[in-house]
Image (cartoon, rainbow, N blue to C red):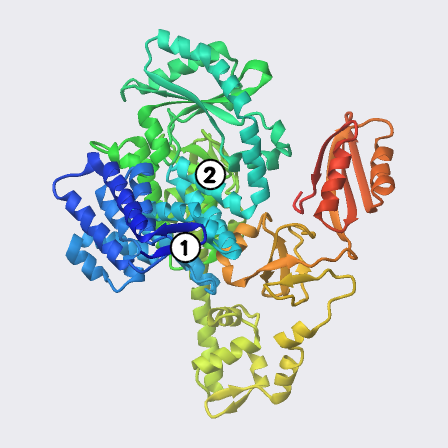
Amino acid sequence: METIAVGKYNLNEEEEKKLILREYRALLRALKTRLKKGDKALVRRAFEIAADAHIDMRRKSGEPYILHPLAVARIVVEEIGLGVTSSICALLHDVVEDTEMTLEDITREFGASYAKIIDGLTKISNVVDLKADTTIQAENFRKILLTLADDPRVILIKLADRLHNMRTLESMSREKQLKISSETTYIYSPLAHRLGLYEIKSELEDLALKYTQPEVYWEIVQGLKETKRERSRYINEFIRPIKEELAAQGFEFEIYGRPKAIHSIWNKMRTKHVAFEEVYDLFAIRIILKSTPEREKEDCWKVYSIVTNFYKPSPERLRDWISVPKGNGYEALHTTVMGIGGRWVEVQIRSSRMNEIAEKGLAAHWKYKEGAPSAQESKLDSWLQHLRDTLSNPDTDTLDFLQDFKLDLFTEEIYIYTPKGDMRVLPKGATALDFAFDIHSELGARCIGAKVNYRLVPLSHEIKSGDQVEIITSSKQKPSEDWLTFVTTAKAKSRIKYYLKEEKRKIAEDGKDMLQRKLEHMKVSLSAYNVNELCAHFKKPSPLDLYYAVAVGSIDLKDLKAFTVTGDKLVQPPKEVKLETKHLVSDEDLMKQKPAKGAELIIFGESSDKILYKLAQCCQPIPGDDVFGFVTSGEGLKIHRTDCPNAAQLLANYGHRVVKTKWAKNKEISFLSGVRIIGLDDVGVIQKITNVISGELKMNMRSLSIDSHDGVFEGTIMVYVHDREELDRLCQRLGNLEGINTVERLEAQS
């Protein structure tokens, strides 16, 4: 009997068959309540086709490939709550892409609806070529969004596929781990958030953090493990009186404390500039009521009243998403109360229906969709419609569209009312112009101002939750370039860009006619060759820009005398060519250039080639930091930290430009790095700080700036260090000084 041993995976053929069968039976058990007559046979047929199609395929870990579609199908059913159709499509999601089987075969076997979903999944194939062009990658994300607008089940299965890939990312190479994790935080976790899949969104973010910043991840995991006993004791003490009172009043309920996601703890540590020990709300208390739909709202408020009888609430931390659910349908009451021992505790109150929607998002909506759609369902439907509108624009395959769209996915929401009292949901920070475009594209294009709560305001006025907004229009108004500087929604940005391009096209038509007449006068035609020659000469990126420049007069047609005519072609004189090519340097020459004296050398790839590069200003890496190389278009190679604020975007969109790097051992060279300190303004504090830096640690300090206000000082110290260890040692020594409260590495943006 053959034994398969690859990496950690070590099962013989017999054990392997048993494992596959176990997984298949687990899927059938999960589907048990959903199976109608004939469904079991369909699921079995899908499993057989998938097993047969992937029979010789193995994953990087060495396990049989069929375990992946089975795992995805189980996630789709157990964690997202979809049914038989989706589980069959999950089983077959890689079949068309990886084997000889076609969509026609799927249609013959299962029907057109199955083929349509699998076609959607094939279009957003999981493995994007690392050498792919940036626009191809952006186009790939756009396809994901198009399929979402068409049939949301496609993206739900895709999210399950991505979740399983993230759970099994350990066997991948470091570059793949970085790229897939960055792609996940860049597009998949915001999508899970927008579709209301909070559990999946949290797990995706936690797993991405595990691979992009392993040190941070394991530090928090360890911290949670060490504080588990103390947390459990506190939670039990906190919930005891609430539990007793709820039982006395006859409520059917579940109450428990659950730890916050690792990613959200890290976010708090980063934004509040605190250590793990100082993050108080490491957990949230959740109260889930078994309540009928007509009584659930009233019951939730009763429970809120009981909780606040025992613990005083923070008035500004009450979130009422029961009266006004979030745009993705999330309903709950959140409050933060002062618990025992002066600790703030977050309490979430929801009914079991609301809880299912919170965990299973969009899929749970379909379950509750019998009869007329409720407010939150129509909200989700209107968001999908808004997505279709945005994607129907001809200019939506660019990276800036994706950037705009991402802002819509993750920002907090505000609720705005029309003059007739209808409510619209917009992202926080939206302006009156965003509101106009949200109602209708034409209304936005003709908008000249607005009345907010009956008061006249300009287009750029930022609207607040609860405002009533009336839009004022004029038939003479046209969108202008500066509108893009103050709108925040993807819909508004894409429509403004579309209108501006249309305007540019109209003006360019005149320029094209003018150019054509001039060329005819020179006895040459407006051929593609000639237009390309002119674009190159006048340094215009496209024919449209060339025609536009001619129309607005920024190109003088008299300059065409620099060309001579050969046959039907425009040719530039040779001396012009020499001038153009004189300063070009080949890539080989660039590699031969010697690094500037005092520049640190980095080793690239597996070899020890030493190449000229720059350190990115956005994250200022130093030896010891986890880094990657990135080939920029204008400035050669740049080194970024993997936790750089721009890392996710660079790795997700430009995977083909990423170079594997590691630090060369070199103690001769110093790097400029910064430390931010906050403490009590006491006599001699500066002397203590300089003693540590110059006296004890013998470091070279470039600058020290300290600003004191009402007894508290905040300072920035710029020092030269050899590596991260040295910087960490400095932070530790400064943190131990009396009166110093916070010491942290200075990030470029702060």
Query: Residue 246's spot in the image, x, y percent?
Result: 38, 11
Q: Quadrant of the N terminus?
A: bottom left
Q: Residues within 10 Å of mark 2 (few under 14, many from 20)?
A: many
**Observer-nearest of 334 and 102:** 102
* CB atoms of marks 1 and 2 within 8 Å: no
- State left or right for residue 705 relative to residue 742: right
Q: Quadrant of the C terminus?
A: top right
Amino acid type of the residue tagged 1 in the rendering = Ala
Amino acid type of the residue tagged 2 in the rendering = Ala
Rendered view: 721 above or below 554? above
Q: Nearer the viewer, mark 1 or mark 2?
A: 1
Q: Pointer 2: what residue?
A: 450
Rendered view: 482 above or below 299? below
Residue at coordinates 52% horizontally, 72% vertically from top-left?
Answer: 550
**Observer-nearest of 283 and 170:** 170
- State left or right for residue 460 relative to residue 57: right
Query: Residue 428's spot in the image, x, y percent?
Result: 49, 37
Query: Residue 353's spot in the image, x, y percent?
Result: 31, 26
- State left or right for residue 536 relative to residue 588: left
Q: Residues within 10 Å of mark 1 (few under 14, many from 20)?
A: few
Q: Earlier in the sequence, mark 1 or mark 2?
A: 1
Q: Alpha-carbon distance for marks 1 and 2?
A: 69 Å
Q: Pointer 1: what residue?
A: 5
Q: Residue furthest left?
A: 37
Secondary element type, mark 1:
strand
